[in-house]
Image (spheres, helix red, strand yellow):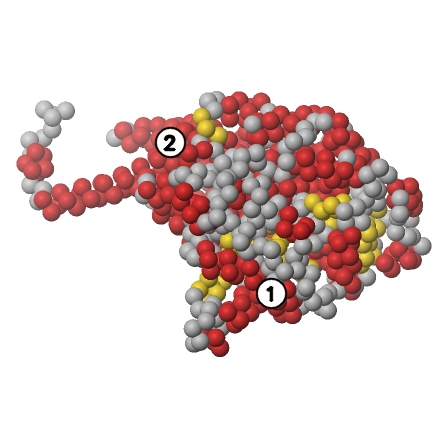
Amino acid sequence: MTKSLPPQSLPASLAATSGPTRRNILRAAGLGGLVLGSSSLLAACGGSDTATGGATTGGGGGGGSVKFGVNEARGSGPAFTRLEAMANTYAEETGTEVSLNAVDHNTFQESINTYLQGTPDDVFTWFAGFRMAQFAENGLLADLSDVWPIEGLGDAFREASTAPDGNQYFVPVSYYPWAVFYRKSVFADNGWTVPESYDDFTALMSDMQGAGITPFAFAAKDAWAPMGTFDILNMRLNGFDFHMALTRGEEAWDSPQVKTVFETWRDLLPFHQEDPLGRTWQEAATAMGNGECGMYLLGSFVVDGVDPEVASDLDFFTFPELDAAIGSDALDAPIDGFCVAAGGQDVDAGKAMAAWLGTAAAADAANSAAEAPFIAANDGASTDSYSELQKKSVEVVQQAGSIAQFLDRDTNADLANTVIAPAIGEFLQNPDDIDTILTSIADQARSILG
Amino acid sequence: MSTTTPVSSRPRERRLAPRDRLVVATMIIIPLVLVLWLVWLPALASVYLSFTRWNGFQIGTIEWVGLQNYRDITTIYPPFWPAIRHNLIWLVFLFFIPTLFGMFLAVILDREMRGSRFYQTAFYLPVVLSLALIGFIWQLFYSRDQGLLNQVLGTQIDWYGDPNINLWSVLFATAWRHTGYIMLIYLAGLKGVDVSLREAAAVDGASEVKTFFTIIFPVMRPINLIVIVIVVIESLRAFDLVWIINKGRNGLEIIAALVSQNVIGEATRYGFGSALAVIMMIISSVFITLYLRAVFSEERQP
């Protein structure tokens, strides 16, 4: 993270000038077939099709073609429909031929390294945070600083799109906040109200337990799921700046501050569903939906895990403050968006499309086509199709003082995936072994971050 | 050697037409290049990378770190020793339960009893399913809150989440598939056994059990060896099911999953992952050596 690239005005030349890349070396060694093979495998997973704007192609304006890689399988739901609608609208408006390469979400993520070093699409769906910065630092992403500023995307989004070298490599399209979700009817039936302070919060949790309801639904079968709890506790107890410094590797995992977070978490565990490690987040969402649990700390995608009539009964509040000196204005709100691959066929075509994808028009095209809209990053986008929850999400995020991406989006990927994820699992098995677990994370972090 | 070679063989070698020689050379060189390129080069590259730190992006950033990866793996990397243990449990379990059971089923089904086709299909069906699907099917059984097993038993056991239990849950699901696989291989072997051997044994008055153990089983030696190799390979490359369930964490650590965790996806610990892969390679080669010795010693016998 400390190393940064010199500012580059010509991103296309980045890969060529920054020394031999693995791709080049392997090609030279005659191994290119393997790399190409695996990335075309990725391409083959989805199957491509092409959308072309009929009306404007003849006019000479526009034309050209661009390849668009999306991390949602064809027909996998509203997320794919939105991306497809954006691709079609772009094709119609500019006369560019857009070939869509749709790949299953997890496959896309697991193949990202090979994908970017093989024959990537020009524009592809990706995430803000370290996840973007790591590829930017290694010259795999095209510099988009000449695409910025984009009308309707404020400083916070520009900041989130910036790599440590000071250039932008990302165009945000949507985001979703993490908050404490609950059923309005369950709260109303029991006379519960949204807690304003930590005392309210503990009183509410005891009340729920008294009523035979587990206060928090909780799942950790997916390694990322419990990270949301860590993030919010760390931001409430140690503040946003400490949290970000920790994710950047500037604070130690065996520090007293982190220990406090885990001790607080341990004390809160009795208020959570038991045995989280075998439970999927969908099952936890169901437990909240059917009233077994009172609340669930999750991203707003929780609505996808409950029945539609339950979804309309959902509301949320941000996690209450734990320390008055720190307050409660920080939250996780991961941003999804697009990058342009430095190794793509046509970086300029990619940049042109990325610039358009950041506009309000792109967000509107996506949201008017799909039955479930996303929360657009662009503040010029129409909010007409938003659900009540989404309208509230927009307000909450706009009022938030600081926004983190997510533990596994902000932290070094090696540390997050191979050390922190299993360590949190270990903690949930043995909540009393905090010292051993944190020492182990710190030892490994020293070895990984060097 | 050359002095003992029959005289006739030399002229015959010489008689190879240039065209034939070309064919022979091509038939040797192409597989040789493929083996060197696809097996030996990656294997040696893994050994080299295991002594380095590399994020997989630029060749120039490979950094020699000596034995540090191996030191880290054995000292500060908590999943490693559980993974070794789990792989060994996997091997022993796979060998003693589903393999023997699969052989038993094959012997029974070989009796041509009524409905044996149906049973063959039923037992073999799981083998046809992809492991991704098997992971999903068993999630329906094992889910703590909504799973069939807890509903039927009236328990609240966390089959996939409790690290003391989940390995056995996964092994059971694996066994469900492995049994059918072994059964089919063994059944095919049994069909190939000369009928006259059985008849001779029956004429001599040997019991079914005795016939199997003293005549059929020894005759099946090649199949038995294949079964042993399959079991060893299956237990070393045990990966898919665990990866689908929780990517090899929390009681389900196995070596292959650890290698993948470190190099697949956004994690880019190529050096560290290679060191784990080399350890796996060393363990495998012990079994491969044993197998090859068994095969060659058999070939040498007249």
Does residue A49 appear in the picture of this structure?
no
Query: SS class of the residue under badge 2?
Result: helix
Is residue B4 or residue A265 the one in the foreground?
A: A265
- The image position of residue A293, as x and y in percent, is 82, 50
- The image position of residue A151, as x and y in percent, is 63, 60
Q: Residue B44, which numbered label?
A: 2
- The image position of residue B253, as x and y in percent, is 59, 35
Please report the residue visible at 43 percent of the width from the left and 73 percent of the height from the top: A60
Tally of marks: 2
Please report the residue visible at 47 percent of the width from the left and 60 percent of the height from the top: A349
Please report the residue visible at 46 percent of the width from the left and 71 percent of the height from the top: A61
Please determine whether, in this image, residue A334 is positioned above or below residue B82. Answer: below
- The image position of residue B228, as x and y in percent, is 44, 35
The subunit letter for the residue under badge 2 reads B
Task: Count residues near mark 2 (Cα–Cα under 10 Å), then give few for <14, some for 14-19, many for 20+.
Answer: few
Q: Residue A362, which numbered label?
A: 1
Type of the residue with mark 1: Ala
> Is B127 left or right of A77, judged from the image as shown?
left
